[in-house]
Image: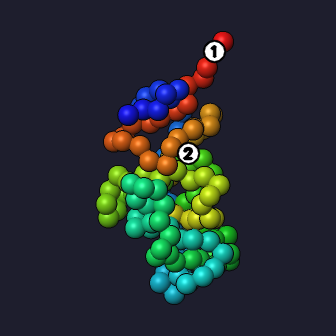
Amino acid sequence: MVPEGWKTDNFSGVEIAVIDGDRGKEYPKSDDLLEDGYCVFLSAKNVTKEGFKFNDVQFISEEKHQKLRKGEVRRGNLVLTTRGTVGQFAYFDESVPRCFSRQLALISPLKRRLSLPLSFPDSTLLSQQAHSS
């Protein structure tokens, strides 16, 4: 059920960029993954129907983070799993620590800020409807 004040739309009505993370020569190898560090290195197991789960995480150093060209998760991004359980979404808001994606797609608004719940049905995009007086 869609909450009152929200409308249903699909991705064709929203200007977005779909970013597939860095797979270049600087992509972290197993030696680069840490138990604690500067930045969570997200994987598909961290993205669930209930949002992000951080009970099993790996980190990368600030130095490694600086070398990567794309894949940094930014506030307002949707994170989409492309491996493991494909199609899981989670919304990256202020409650989530600094992250870099590993084999995940990032969906980023280009012009307008998306207002999304942490989980939503199917591939439906929910955006807050503007109220007019």
Mark linked to residue 80? none
Residue at 60% across / 82% down in the picture? 36
Q: Position of residue 19 (x, y in %)?
A: 50, 51
Residue at 66% across / 75% down in the picture? 38
| Badge 2 or badge 1: first in the primary sequence | 2
Secondary element at tag 1: loop
Residue at 52% across / 32% down in the picture? 127
Q: Position of residue 17 (x, y in %)?
A: 53, 43
Mark 2, other Cα within 10 Å: few <14 / some 14–19 / many ≥20: many
Mark linked to residue 132? 1
**Viewer can see residue 70:** no
> Where the C terminus falls, by quadrant?
top right
Q: From the viewer's perspective, is 74 left or right of 118? A: right
Q: Position of residue 14 (x, y in %)?
A: 51, 31
Q: Quadrant of residue 86?
A: bottom left
Whole-angstrom CA distance, mark 2 to mark 1, is 27 Å
**In the image, residue 100 above or below residue 74:** below
Q: Nearer the viewer, residue 4 or 51?
A: 4
* Residue that label 2 marks: 108
Q: Amino acid at mark 2?
A: Ser
